[in-house]
Amino acid sequence: MDNGGKTFKKFKTSLNKGISTISTMTSNTIEKSKLSTQIDTLEKDIQKIYMSIGEDAYLEWKTDPNKYLEFTNNFEEIKINLEKIQELTEKLNTIGDDEN
């Protein structure tokens, strides 16, 4: 093989590695974006639940302060969403760690 052929082969190999790297980085960026969107959605859902709890608590307090047991489902939903956020954040933090 002449020098031109060897040079072309090196160029082709280098180009293929570059394309593979770009593809991996793009895939990781998309995955990170999806996870970030899921986290944001869950955090917004939690804020809505907090607002609902506050309004409901006030209305219940006006009539009977002993009715706070009705908020158990809201508290459980918040707990589940916070756990999901933790899992998604951990997954988000691992994406791309093996690139370097």
Image: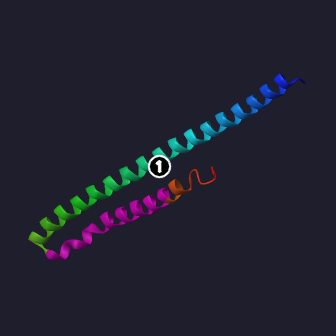
Nearest to the observer: residue 10 or residue 53: 10
| Left or right side of 50 for 86 | right
Nearest to the observer: residue 59 or residue 42: 42
Q: Is residue 86 magenta?
A: yes
Could you say which quadrant of the image residue 21 lies in?
top right
Residue 33 percent location from the top left of the image:
46, 44
Q: Quadrant of the N terminus?
A: top right
Residue 92 percent location from the top left of the image:
51, 54
> What secondary structure predominates along the stretch shown in magenta?
helix
Residue 77 percent location from the top left of the image:
36, 62
Considering every residue shown, the one lying at the far right of the view is: 1
Dot 1 crowding, Cα within 10 Å, few <14, some 14–19, many 20+: some
For label 1, the residue is 35
Residue occupying the point 37% across, 51% down: 40
Residue 37 percent location from the top left of the image:
41, 47
Considering every residue shown, the one lying at the far left of the view is: 62
Q: Which residues are magenta?
A: 65-89
Q: Is residue 8 magenta?
A: no
